[in-house]
Image (cartoon, grey):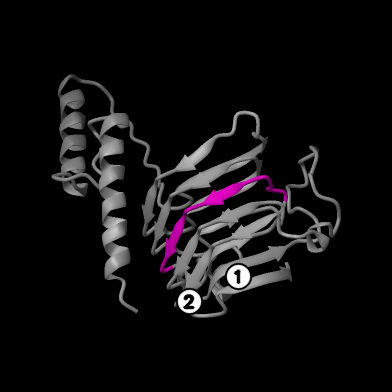
């Protein structure tokens, strides 16, 4: 497959993302900025350490790995009144997932690009997520994790660009290309997969999902995937 046109599109998205970062993130940010690298970040960090040590101060450091779950709405429940959105982001080479929605209802996810992420890319996690609008998103080259690195078995068995666990969502003008396995996979649990300690409204009855029509699925495209591009219904 010729990815040149898609790569050009992705490049433009990354340029826009870089300008966005420059406005919002500290000047100490080194990731994905022209003239910046891991080396410049390390040089600045060591200079800061030496300055404090020369002043007789103690230096402590904490390292955080943000290489997985690039964007994750976690157990936010119903946010439909505020209607938050995830818009015009470029995410690439994430070690796990691209955008994850976990027991959150009412998000808008539009005009994002996910490239070469590992495991399911746009990921509806628990089966309770609904009233989401997914529009104009692109997923490219969804990849299989290394042995033992998949978060759930299907990450390894069949990594899919759009993994959807609830039919009460809208999908318009999205595209999936070059996935290791599938483009779109609607895979419903009998009951939302929530922690035992969770006592809130699960939003779905037992086996309700499998007897509910997909709310909207219009003008989406999937091609050049390793398996079936569309898998309309199965059960976890």
Q: Position of residue 227 (x, y in %)?
A: 54, 80
Quarter holding the C terminus is bottom right
**Residue 154: mark in rendering:** 1
Residue extending farthest to the front is: 219
Judge from the rendering whether residue 210 lies leftward or rightward of residue 55; answer left or right.
Answer: right
Which residue does the image show at 21% across and 31% down from the upper left? 49
Which residue does the image show at 46% across and 72% down from the upper left? 179
Judge from the rendering whether residue 162 lies leftward or rightward of residue 165; answer left or right.
Answer: left
Q: Nearer the viewer, mark 1 or mark 2?
A: 2
Q: Badge 1, how many Cα within 10 Å: few under 14, some, many 20+?
A: some
Corner quadrant of residue 235: bottom right
Residue closer to the observer: 20 or 175: 175
Badge 2 element: loop
Residue closer to the observer: 63 or 15: 15
Which residue does the image show at 33% across and 31% down from the upper left? 60
- Is residue 103 shown in magenta? no
- Circle 2 residue: 225
Identify the magenta region.
128-141
Quarter holding the N terminus is bottom left
How far, Cα to Cα, is label 1 from label 2?
16 Å
Badge 1 element: helix
Q: Position of residue 120 (x, y in %)?
A: 53, 63
**Residue 14: mark in rendering:** none
Corner quadrant of residue 94: bottom left
Which residue does the image show at 84% across and 60% down from the upper left? 207
Going from N to C along the chain, the mark reached first, 1 or 2, is 1
Up the image or down, 80 lies above or below 100; here it is above
Q: Position of residue 24 (x, y in %)?
A: 32, 30
């Amino acid at each position: 497959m010729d990815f040149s046109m898609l790569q050009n599109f992705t490049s433009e998205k990354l340029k826009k993302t870089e300008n966005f970062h420059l406005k919002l993130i500290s000047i100490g940010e080194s990731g994905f900025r022209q003239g910046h690298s891991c080396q410049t970040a390390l040089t600045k960090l060591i200079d800061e350490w030496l300055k404090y040590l020369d002043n007789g101060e103690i230096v402590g450091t904490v390292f955080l790995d943000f290489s997985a779950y690039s964007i994750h709405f976690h157990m936010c429940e119903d946010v439909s009144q505020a209607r938050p959105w995830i818009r015009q982001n470029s995410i690439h080479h994430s070690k796990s997932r691209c955008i994850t929605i976990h027991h959150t209802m009412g998000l808008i996810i539009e005009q994002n690009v996910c490239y070469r992420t590992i495991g399911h890319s746009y990921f509806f996690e628990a089966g309770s997520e609904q009233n989401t609008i997914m529009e104009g998103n692109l997923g490219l080259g969804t990849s299989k994790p290394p042995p033992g690195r998949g978060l759930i078995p299907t990450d390894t068995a069949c990594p899919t660009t759009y993994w959807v666990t609830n039919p009460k969502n809208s999908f318009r003008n999205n595209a999936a290309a070059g996935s290791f396995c599938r483009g779109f996979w609607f895979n419903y649990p009998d009951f939302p997969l929530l922690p035992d300690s969770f006592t809130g409204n699960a939003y779905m009855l037992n086996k309700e999902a499998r007897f509910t029509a997909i709310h909207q699925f219009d003008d989406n495209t999937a091609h050049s995937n390793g398996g079936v591009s569309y898998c309309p219904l199965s059960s976890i």
